[in-house]
Amino acid sequence: MRQKWNGKRVAWMAGAAGAVLSLAGCGGGTSSTSQAPCPRIAILADGADLTQFRPGAPRDLTSMVLDARIIGFDARCDFAGRDRRAVEVRVTPRFEAERGPAAQGRSVELPWFVVLSDPADSVNLARVTSATQVSFPANVARAVAAARPAAIMVQPAEGTQVRDYLVRIAFQLTPDDLAYNRQRGPR
């Protein structure tokens, strides 16, 4: 299902079996022995792809250095603090990358971030940036990788619950990368 977020398309990871697996670590109960609830977690559609080209070259297949996408994530939510109101969310994105014809080395770094926004989806409350190294063995042009988990704390305001908050995952894009994604459209 796709929804709008401040005019941007958001790919929601809800419904299908992928969401069940992605959110397997998040529970919904409230008893002292239950798992902590998770906020809504999604991959930002405009930031789900990263295609890089050789600087100064035309944007075509011969000058492509890298084509990567966020293919999913795992999430785990655990209570934090004695009142069991705050929740630590650990998100582990999974990537697929393709080495382009213009690539120079056998490894690339994929810059990405996780951002937490308030229930009204009007303010970013926290942001964690990271990068994941992907290596391509000899004679292999595609590889998959999982990032190290990024932890973000959700401390619900009075009258809100953890489930009211939003966590989004995306590549850290340059303005040109973002324009390219928007021109090409979601894959």
Image (tube, rainbow, N blue to C red):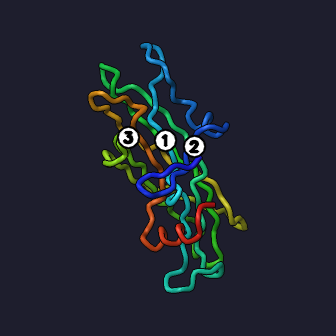
Could you tell me which residue is drawn at 45 percent across and 65 percent down?
Answer: 173
Amino acid type of the residue that numbered disc 2 sits on in the rendered structure? Met
Q: Position of residue 36 (x, y in %)?
A: 44, 25
Could you tell me which residue is drawn at 58 percent across and 58 percent down?
Answer: 69
Could you tell me which residue is drawn at 46 percent across and 56 percent down?
Answer: 112
Which quadrant of the view contains residue 80?
A: top left
Which numbered disc flags the more N-terminal residue, 2 or 1? Answer: 2
Amino acid type of the residue that numbered disc 3 sits on in the rendered structure? Ile
Q: Secondary structure at mark 3?
A: strand
94 sits to left or right of 152 = right
Q: Secondary structure at mark 2?
A: loop
Q: Are marks 2 and 1 in contact (CB under 8 Å)?
A: yes
Q: Quadrant of the C terminus?
A: bottom right
Which quadrant of the view contains residue 130?
A: bottom left
Query: Which mark is drawn over residue 13?
Result: 2
Q: Position of residue 91 (x, y in %)?
A: 48, 41
Is 142 situated above or below 55?
above
User: Tag 2: Cα neighbours inside 10 Å, few (<14), some, or many (≥20)?
Assistant: many
Which quadrant of the view contains residue 53?
A: bottom right
Q: Which residue is mark 1?
A: 41
Q: Which residue is mark 3?
A: 152
Is 22 situated above or below 30?
below
Amino acid type of the residue that numbered disc 1 sits on in the rendered structure? Ile
- Residue toward you, 68 or 7: 7
